[in-house]
Image (cartoon, rainbow, N blue to C red):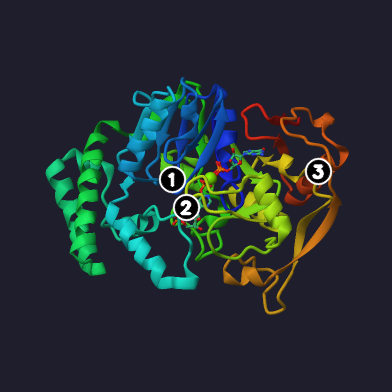
C-alpha cells in the first residue's frame, strides 16, 4: 500500500486512530491531512491509551515519521502540550515531526470569536469543539490568515498576530479584563509559533521522495464525510475539507499517486454536536450503546448521540470518497442487543426530488426504513477470526457490506491494536 488514504464515513469518531495505528506497521510516514485540535484519535497499544489531536496517530510507533499537511489548522500551544504528553509516555516525537510551512495557525482570537458566534446562534448553534477551527479557516479564505512560514520572519509575524488581536477586541467589543486575558494567550501563542519554525518543511517534496524510494505513506483523515463542508450535513459541519480528495490537496500529491482509499465506519452511528441524525436513538437503547461503547468525545468529553447503522449515508460516503475497501469498527459493542436495525433506505418527503441526494437541513425530515436482524449474545471482544464470530454477527456484517457496495476487509472487535479480524 504505497499511498493509502484513511477517511471517516460517518460523523467522525469511527475509530480512525485505531485503524491508522494498526495499518502503520510497515509505513515510513503517516500524514494528517485535515482538521486540527478538534480531532481526537484514540490509540490503545503497548499498554498505553493515548488520544491524539493534532499529531498523526502513526507516531505511536517509534519508527514512523509524522507529517502535518498544508490544509490542517495548527494550534501551536495545544501542539506543545500534546508533544509533552507523548514525551511523558516515553515516545519522543521531536525528531520525527514535520509540518507544512503553509499550515494556518489557530490564533487565540479565533476561540473568542467562535464562542461569541455559537452563543449568538443559541439553539441553532453548531455545537463546535471550541478549538477555533471555523474562524481560522474563515481568515484563511479571506486571505488574512497567519501561516507557519510567516513565523520565519518574526517582526512580520508579530505584527500580523497583534493585528488579529486588535481586530478581535474591536469586533467583539471586549472589556478590559477579557482583552487582557486574550493578550496573555497571544503571548504564549507567539512564543510557541516561533519555536515551530524549524519544523516547517515542503511536505509535498518529502512525500514524493518517500514514494519514489518505494516506501509507503498513510494519509490520515480527521472528522468524517458527513462533517465535510461540501459533502456533509451543512451547516452542521466542520470547516476543513475532510473527504479523501482533500488528502491530495493538503499533502501536495497528485491523485494518481493514491493506491487505496480506506473508509472507516462504526457498526452503528454516532454524532457529537448538533444537526440532523435520521437513525438517532434517543431512549434507553441509545444510552445502552453509549455506555457499552464508551461514547464520550475524545476531545471535549461530550456524550455522543448514538443510533442505528445508516447504510444510506455510508453508501453515499463510500461513493464520495471512492473507497477501495472499508473497516467496520466497534462490532463488539452490539453484543447482547436482541435485535439490531439497519437503515436500508429512506421514506422520502414527497416534496423532495428523488434524484437529488440531500444532506442539508431537510435530511432530518427523511424517515428511515429499517431491516431488523437478530443480534447475538456472545461477548466477541478481542476476536481475531472471522469463522469464530457468532453466525448472527457475520450475517450483520455481510448485510451491511451488501448495502454499502464496498468490501468490508477488516472488522474491529475492541479498542486494542490487535483486536481485529481480517477477511480475504
Ligand atoms: P477517531 O476519531 O475516528 O479516531 O475515533 P475516536 O478515538 O474518537 O473514537 C473511537 C473510540 O472507540 C475510541 O475510544 C477507541 O479506543 C474505541 N474503539 C476503536 N475501535 C474499537 C472497537 O472495535 N471496539 C471498541 N469497543 N472500541 C473501539
Ligand atoms: P475526529 O477526527 C467528531 C464536529 C463537532 C461539531 C462540528 C463542527 O475525532 O473524528 P468544529 O470544532 O470542527 O468547528 O465543530 O464538527 N467535529 C467532530 N465530531 N469527531 C471529530 O473529529 C470532530 N471534529 C469536529 O462536534 O459538531
Ligand atoms: Mg475522535
**Disc 3 to disc 1, how far (Cα)?**
34 Å
Judge depth for marks 3 and 1 and give the one in front. Answer: 3
Q: Do callouts 2 and 1 mark residues in contact (Cβ within 8 Å)?
A: yes
Disc number placed over residue 249 in the picture, else none: 1
Mark 2 or mark 3: which comes first in sequence?
2
**Disc 2 to disc 1, how far (Cα)?**
10 Å
Badge 2: residue crowd in 10 Å (few <14, some 14–19, many ≥20): many
Mark 2 or mark 1: which comes first in sequence?
2
Badge 1: residue crowd in 10 Å (few <14, some 14–19, many ≥20): some
Is residue 303 left or right of 145 when viewed as pictured? right
Label 3 CB less than 8 angstroms from ligand 1: no
Please identify the quarter of the rendering in which residue 134 is found: bottom left
Badge 3 marks a residue whose secondary structure is helix
In the figure, 64 relative to 357: above or below?
above
Q: Is residue 312 visible?
A: yes
What is the x, y in percent for residue 207? 42, 30
Nearer-the-camera pick, 26 or 330: 330
Residue farthest along the left direction in this orientation: 155
In the figure, 401 relative to 168: above or below?
above
What is the x, y in percent for residue 153? 16, 40
Mark 3 or mark 1: which comes first in sequence?
1
Is residue 416 left or right of 148 when viewed as pictured? right
Q: Do callouts 2 and 3 mark residues in contact (Cβ within 8 Å)?
A: no
How many numbered discs sit on the rendered protein? 3
Disc number placed over residue 398 in the picture, else none: 3
Residue indicated by mark 2:
241
Identified at 50% across, 21% down, the residue is: 214
- Quadrant containing the C terminus is top right
Amino acid at each position: 500500500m504505497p499511498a493509502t488514504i484513511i477517511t471517516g464515513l460517518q460523523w467522525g469518531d469511527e475509530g480512525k486512530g485505531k485503524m491508522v495505528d494498526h495499518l502503520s506497521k510497515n509505513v515510513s510516514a503517516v500524514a494528517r491531512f485535515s482538521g486540527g485540535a478538534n480531532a481526537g484519535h484514540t490509540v490503545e497499544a503497548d499498554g498505553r491509551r493515548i488520544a491524539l489531536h493534532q499529531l498523526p496517530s502513526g507516531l505511536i510507533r517509534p519508527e514512523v515519521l509524522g507529517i502535518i499537511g498544508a490544509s490542517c489548522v495548527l494550534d501551536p500551544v495545544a501542539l506543545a502540550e500534546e508533544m509533552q504528553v507523548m514525551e511523558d509516555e516515553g515516545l519522543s516525537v521531536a525528531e520525527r515531526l514535520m509540518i507544512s510551512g503553509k499550515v494556518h495557525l489557530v490564533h487565540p482570537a479565533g476561540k473568542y470569536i467562535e464562542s461569541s458566534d455559537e452563543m449568538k446562534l443559541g439553539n441553532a448553534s453548531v455545537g463546535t469543539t471550541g478549538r477555533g477551527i471555523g474562524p481560522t479557516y474563515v481568515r484563511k479564505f479571506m486571505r488574512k490568515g497567519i501561516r507557519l512560514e510567516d513565523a520565519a520572519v518574526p517582526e512580520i509575524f508579530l505584527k500580523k498576530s497583534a493585528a488579529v488581536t486588535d481586530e478581535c477586541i474591536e469586533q467583539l467589543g471586549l472589556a478590559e479584563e477579557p482583552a487582557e486575558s486574550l493578550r496573555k494567550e497571544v503571548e504564549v501563542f507567539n512564543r510557541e509559533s516561533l519555536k515551530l519554525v524549524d519544523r516547517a518543511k515542503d511536505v509535498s517534496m518529502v512525500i514524493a521522495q518517500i514514494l519514489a524510494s518505494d516506501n509507503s505513506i498513510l494519509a490520515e483523515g480527521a472528522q468524517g464525510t458527513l462533517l465535510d463542508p461540501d459533502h456533509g450535513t451543512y451547516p452542521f459541519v466542520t470547516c476543513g475539507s475532510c473527504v479523501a480528495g482533500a488528502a491530495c490537496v493538503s499533502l501536495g500529491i497528485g491523485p494518481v499517486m493514491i493506491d487505496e482509499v480506506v473508509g472507516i465506519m462504526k457498526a452503528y452511528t454516532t454524532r457529537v454536536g448538533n444537526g440532523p441524525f435520521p437513525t438517532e436513538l434517543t431512549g434507553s437503547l441509545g444510552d445502552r450503546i453509549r455506555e457499552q461503547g464508551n461514547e464520550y468525545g475524545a476531545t471535549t468529553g461530550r456524550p455522543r448521540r448514538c443510533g442505528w447503522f445508516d447504510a444510506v449515508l455510508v453508501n453515499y460516503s463510500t461513493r464520495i470518497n471512492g473507497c477501495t475497501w472499508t473497516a467496520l469498527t466497534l462490532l463488539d459493542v452490539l453484543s447482547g442487543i436482541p435485535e439490531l436495525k439497519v437503515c436500508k433506505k429512506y421514506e422520502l418527503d414527497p416534496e423532495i426530488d428523488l434524484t437529488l441526494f440531500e444532506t442539508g437541513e431537510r435530511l432530518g425530515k427523511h424517515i428511515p426504513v429499517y431491516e431488523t436482524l437478530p443480534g447475538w449474545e456472545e461477548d466477541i471482544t478481542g476476536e481475531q477470526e472471522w469463522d469464530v464470530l457468532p453466525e448472527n454477527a457475520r450475517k450483520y456484517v455481510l448485510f451491511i457490506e451488501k448495502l454499502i457496495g464496498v468490501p468490508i476487509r477488516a472488522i474491529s472487535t475492541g479498542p486494542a491494536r490487535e483486536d481485529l479480524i481480517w477477511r480475504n
